[in-house]
Image: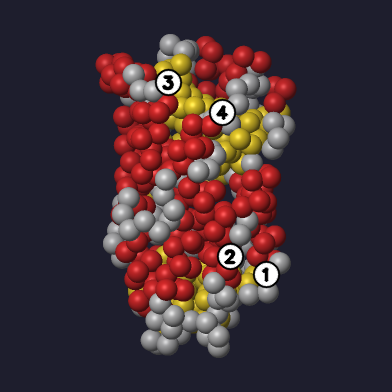
């Protein structure tokens, strides 16, 4: 790509940094434009399916990411009303043989740090903070990003990796504010010694209850447990990272089994997020401008695939730019075409999982238990093969 202007990337989160690394692996320079004064990530744990590890390896951070992760033994689904197990998926040797990679969990800040260090070490990547992209102009040969500071940056293309409230999406898609789900998640990170002994499982555990669920798993070499609890409270507007009192958290869980309630009582310093997503759309690309990650396909957290999909996007984008040398608009369109159906499937199935697996009550919940408990781990592998066997280059979901 000698002599070409760099690619501009709006957003220095996991998706934006992954995109920069993917481009650098193909010899393509980039400038990452991050609105915050410092590069970092908020939040706590995220889950990494085998498809995430494929992306790590392709992006050149496989060894580092593997060293930071906690490898869990099971995905475990519990009944928050009865207090017992519904089903589990074994993540041991059989799973790794089937998908070629493990399943793990990691602190979001640690994962962002893996990408950030790799970007800082690469001479093809320039990182600029306090540089929010608010608009852009393009002339068929280049794109000029307009910054909140009044400055500009010009490149061969612009990738909008600027998240749920993307300024780039506002221009490319123009579909208004995100869809508010009415579900609110509360997050806490607790020292492992405060986790009840009989629940210190090396598993990503989900307790499913009527209009609520609880997730917990170990982090950072078992020093911490990530705790996320979610319930339907018809929240009318988006909220991100707002501190809340324990009493508010417990309001959505007064009806569940004491064993499940007890997990919540061990949390502290709770913060809340009102969950939002958007409907899938076909229009991700406008000439030399394309969307990536949550800017393109924001999804509810219920499939634990938001960061994974952004990393897959980065892999695909880099491959398509390499495959269409000097033809950026064709490369961006090829990227969109390959990513559209897979990401739409995850968006829509994330909503469906919330309704039909995590939050049902009564006979609906009994039916869920009967159907899900009847499957073996090997049968579950086939159910999730379309997702965990993906590489980011699949033309369909």
When the figure is inspected, residue 367 is found, relative to residue 358, above or below; the finding is: above
Question: Counting residues from the N terminus, which is met first, the one under dot 4 or under dot 3?
Answer: 4
Of the residues tagged 2 and 4, which is closer to the observer?
4
Q: Label 4: few (<14), some or many (≥20) within 10 Å?
A: many
| Relative image position of residue 79 (x, y in whole percent) | 43, 17
**Residue toward you, 78 or 203:** 203
Classify residue 190 as left or right of residue 5.
right
- Mark in the foreground, 1 or 4: 4
**What's the residue at 54%, 48% (across, down)?**
53
The answer to whether 270 is drawn above or below residue 83 in the figure is below
The disc label shown at residue 245, or none:
none
Query: Which is more N-terminal, label 2 or label 1?
Result: 2
Q: What mark, if any, has residue 73 been given in the picture?
A: 4
Mark 1 vs mark 4, CA separation in Å:
35 Å
The numbered disc on residue 122 is 1
- The percent position of residue 312, horizontal first and vertical second, equals 46, 56
Evaluate whether residue 85 shows in this view: yes
Residue at mark 2 to residue at mark 4: CA–CA distance:
30 Å
In the rendered view, how is the structure colored? secondary structure
Question: How far is disc 2 from disc 3 in space, using C-alphas?
Answer: 38 Å
Q: Secondary structure at mark 1?
A: loop
Kindly identify which residue carries mark 3. Answer: 87
Question: Which of the two labelled residues, at mark 2 and mark 4, occupies the earlier sequence position?
Answer: 2
Residue at which label 2 appears: 21
C-beta proximity under 8 Å, tags 2 and 4: no
């Amino acid at each position: 790509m000698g002599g070409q202007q760099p690619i501009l990337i709006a957003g220095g989160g996991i998706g934006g940094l992954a995109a920069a690394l993917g481009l650098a692996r193909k010899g393509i320079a980039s400038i990452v434009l991050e609105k915050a004064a410092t590069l970092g990530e908020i939040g706590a744990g995220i889950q990494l399916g085998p498809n995430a590890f494929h992306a790590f390896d392709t992006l050149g951070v496989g060894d580092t990411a593997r060293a930071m992760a906690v490898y869990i033994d099971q995905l475990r689904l519990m009944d928050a009303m009865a207090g017992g197990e519904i089903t589990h998926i074994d993540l041991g040797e059989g799973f790794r043989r089937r998908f070629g990679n493990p399943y793990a969990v990691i602190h979001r800040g640690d994962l962002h740090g893996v990408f950030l260090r790799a970007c800082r070490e690469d001479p093809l990547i320039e990182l600029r903070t306090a540089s929010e992209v608010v608009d852009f102009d393009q002339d068929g040969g280049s794109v000029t990003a307009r910054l909140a500071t009044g400055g500009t940056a010009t490149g061969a293309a612009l990738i909008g990796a600027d998240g749920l409230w993307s300024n780039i999406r506002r221009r490319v898609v123009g579909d208004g504010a995100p869809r508010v789900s009415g579900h609110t998640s509360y997050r806490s990170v607790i020292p492992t010694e405060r986790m009840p002994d009989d629940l210190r499982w090396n598993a990503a555990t989900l307790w499913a209850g009527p209009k609520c669920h609880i997730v917990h798993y170990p982090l950072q070499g078992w020093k911490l447990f990530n705790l996320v609890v979610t319930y339907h409270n018809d929240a009318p507007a988006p909220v991100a990272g707002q501190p809340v009192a324990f009493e508010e958290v417990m309001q959505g869980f007064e009806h569940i089994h004491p064993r499940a309630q007890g997990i919540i009582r061990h949390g502290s310093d709770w913060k809340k997020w009102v969950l939002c997503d958007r409907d899938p759309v076909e229009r991700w690309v406008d000439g030399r401008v394309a969307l990536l990650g949550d800017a393109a396909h924001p999804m509810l957290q219920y499939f634990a695939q938001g960061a994974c999909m952004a990393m897959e996007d980065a892999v695909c984008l880099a491959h398509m730019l390499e495959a269409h040398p000097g033809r950026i608009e064709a490369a961006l369109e090829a990227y969109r075409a390959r990513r559209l159906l897979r990401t739409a499937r995850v968006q829509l199935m994330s909503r469906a999982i919330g309704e039909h697996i995590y939050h049902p009550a009564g006979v609906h919940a009994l039916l869920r238990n009967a159907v899900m408990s009847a499957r073996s781990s090997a049968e579950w592998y086939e159910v999730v093969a379309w997702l965990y066997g993906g590489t980011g280059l699949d033309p369909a979901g």
